Amino acid sequence: MTSAATPADRIGKGSGKMPDRLFRGVSRAAGLTVVVILVLLATMLVLGSVPAFKQFGIVGFVTGITWDPVAGIYGALPYIIGTILSALLGLLLATPIALLTAVYLAEMASARVAAPLTFLIELIAAIPSVVIGLWGVFILTPFLKGTVESFLVATLGRVIPLFEGPPLGIGLFAAGVILAIMILPTVVAISREVITSVPATQREAMFALGATRWEVISKAVLPAARSGIIGAVILGLGRALGETMAVTMVIGNAQKIPTSLFDQSQTIASKIATTFNEATSETQTSSLIALGLVLLVITVGLNIGARMLVWRTSGPALGE
């Protein structure tokens, strides 16, 4: 004679499994959808790039420096260099400011100061890029031309070739500053959350040993939050690589390889945005699509490299 099933047994065998299976199936489908979208996007870019790669070759297209629709010659190297330099410059300018701001908001500021300041910083992310671009054209670039760029050219331009050239305001340096402003809220918000999530016991243990606040932050909080901070920087880099309108309005859109921080340049995204509607031939359209494929490869490659850096720097913690 078998005993009657308990309510817990009935839940495990009956209705309880169906919601679990449904949730598992929906979650799996959502995850696969993201992968499918990425594969379809990459496939579309590859197929659209075939005519350009057939005519110029992959290496020839990537290393080419001439973009001449009249002659039917297209090379991507100036735009690749402009994209990477502007993104790295923006990241270099934004990361120290973002990290110090996140530490202040998470560790030092009172609640009355941290809450409104956090809101104002995150509000920058909601400003449309074209509005930031307009501000950059009419306010930022004249300011940079008369102050920062003039100072750097006068003091460092004779010694370091990177700072040579006339301070025009419009150029690679202005694009880097614009990108720094645009990625700042992302890096600050994520870094602040990561620093806040560090267990309070680590801070209390350091204070109990007689450490100062600076020693607690530098030796206990920041090392524990290192991988999360690097992840925030990765997200900021991803946005900087793909930003279009604001950069297009201040970088100058010159079709050449920049040799100075103050040279006018052009990024892959700005090149596609400014010329795609004007493409009249199959080769030109295919070359612009190939630029998009190159940008995707650069973005994925830099993100993979950054993720490997995160795993290497926080390997023992990830295994716990």
Image: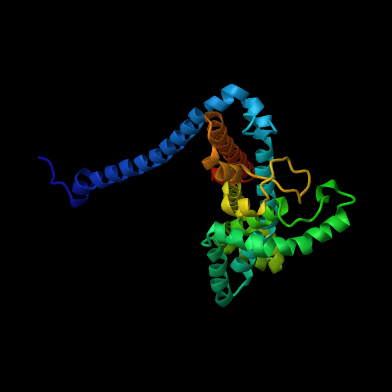
**78 or 104: nearer the viewer:** 78
- Residue sticking out furthest to the bottom: 112
Residue 281: percent from the left, percent from the top?
53, 31
Query: Which quarter of the rendering shows the C terminus?
Result: top right
**193 or 50: nearer the viewer:** 50
Query: Which quarter of the rendering shows the N terminus?
Result: top left
Q: Viewed as shown, does residue 80 lie left or right of 156?
A: left
Taking 113 as reference, is 206 above or below it? above
- Residue sticking out furthest to the front: 70
Residue 268: percent from the left, percent from the top?
61, 41
Residue at 37 percent across and 43 percent down: it is 30
- Residue sticking out furthest to the left: 1
Residue 120: percent from the left, percent from the top?
56, 69
Residue 167: percent from the left, percent from the top?
79, 56
Q: Quadrant of residue 122?
A: bottom right
Q: Quadrant of residue 319?
A: top right
Q: Can residue 34 be seen from the camera position used here?
A: yes
